[in-house]
Amino acid sequence: MSDHDARCPVPHGDPHGDPHGDRRRTAPPGERTTPRVEVRDGVWHVRALPLVRQVLREADATVQAGFSAETARQGLTGDHPPVLYADGPEHRRQRSATARFFTPATVRRRYRDLMEERADELVERIRQDGGAELSAVTLRYSVEVAAQVVGLTNSDVDGMSRRLERFFSGPVTGSSGAPQRRLPGRLGAVVGSVRPLWAMSAFRFRDVRPAVRARRRQPREDVISHLLQQGYTDREILVECLTYAAAGMATTREFIAVAAWHLLEDDALRAEYLAAEEPARHGILHEILRLEPVVGHLYRRTTQDLVLEDGEERHEVPAGALLDLYVRQANADPQELGEDARRLCPERPRPKGVRPEVMSFGDGAHRCPGGFIAIQETDIFLQRLLRLPLEFAHPPRVSWVELIAAYEVRDVVLRVGAGQGWREPSPASTAR
């Protein structure tokens, strides 16, 4: 028995016993997994894990080209480029200055109690109501947590949730491939020119402006207070707030829904998750996120010639080339993660230096700083939710944001069925 077989002996939730079974709930239609590198219409398409990782770490040879960055840069003014679009020394300075808001120690000390209180309230409401549409619940939950980190705490959370959902709404592709005009568009939506100005204005005047005024009078330990100390203008703060809203609210909302989907449909995995201590629970969530990265594509443009080596193959990428990095395919690279890379195995062996979620939070200079917060708040909510005897009213619906191949899970209608009712957490499951 190989080391891999010993650590991943039983495919979770595979009724046919197929060791290579695809456990993903959000696989896009027409997904291509090969070739590992190809050039089409001048764009370099990269699907191999080691090469995606290499490009993301080439801070001196590439710049951000995703989330409409190149279009957005043309319209940017002011002394402080948004952190999402910055590169080089300015980006490193911005990231270093805000890193303290996202450390595990800070999250546990400042935000864990809030997460637990809100999760208790929301799950109790689901129990009393006999069910809920999960994506609506998780939007409010993720908005309230992220708002504390950013400093958007001087307006109504429910109203802010509605305003952000309207702002991020945009064309998406349904499972049938037909365009649909609804649902949030996530990180790409920070470009105001492609989103309704009225929705951005509502967020600016009802949520951002009151928070800025309050922090001018009395600074706090949050992102807005930091930006004011650095001399950011109101407009620059607005753009940063939209960026953090997309990264910290919309994407976490999607992951909570898809993680709940996996755990509710797999009794053995759910039991394992609920009985585990925190590190093991986080490991299960990281493995689900590896299979279901919310953002499926990242983009970089080379600023100098770049050589990519994949085994015996050598690829010379010229300066000025656009690289399309396939996160979903990299996360399931069979050469790096095993031929069964599309099934769920929390104990999966990984190449040295590769994180459990692989590329789902990105890598290199632009790696998502809020990864720990996302996993922590997901875990806290699901511990409570999954102790209810829940069932799906019908299968959830998956749509796609084409800009970044991001999924959106909606119509996640849960109902509380007959059964044991609420189950008290075991000591192990509540361990910190």
Image: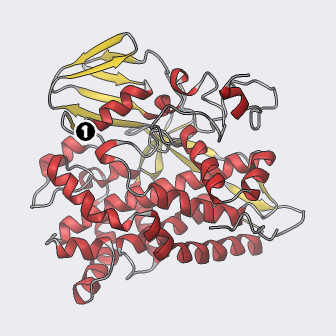
> Most extreme residue toward the bottom, as rendered?
217
Residue for point 30% across, 70% down: 223
Which colouring convention does the figure follow? secondary structure
Residue for point 45% across, 54% down: 371
Q: Position of residue 426 (x, y in %)?
A: 78, 67
In this view, 203 is above or below 84: below
Left or right of 335? Residue 11 is right
In this view, 216 is above or below 358: below
Residue designated by label 1: 65
Left or right of 359? Residue 349 is right
- Label 1 CA crowd tier, 10 Å (few <14, some 14–19, many 20+): some
- Label 1 residue SS: loop
> Most extreme residue toward the right, as rendered?
419
Q: Report whether residue 258 is seen.
A: no
In this view, 129 is above or below 219: above
- Locate the C terminus and report the quarter of the image it occupies: bottom right
Give the tally of numbered discs.
1
Q: Position of residue 215 (x, y in %)?
A: 27, 83
Q: The residue under label 1 is which amino acid type?
A: Ala
Q: Position of residue 200 (x, y in %)?
A: 30, 64
Which of the two residues, 334 or 25, is positioned nearer the viewer here? Answer: 334
Q: Position of residue 156 (x, y in %)?
A: 44, 80
Residue for point 74% across, 60% down: 386
Residue for point 47% across, 51% down: 182
Q: Report whether residue 62 is seen.
A: yes
Which of the two residues, 196 or 62, is positioned nearer the viewer here? Answer: 62
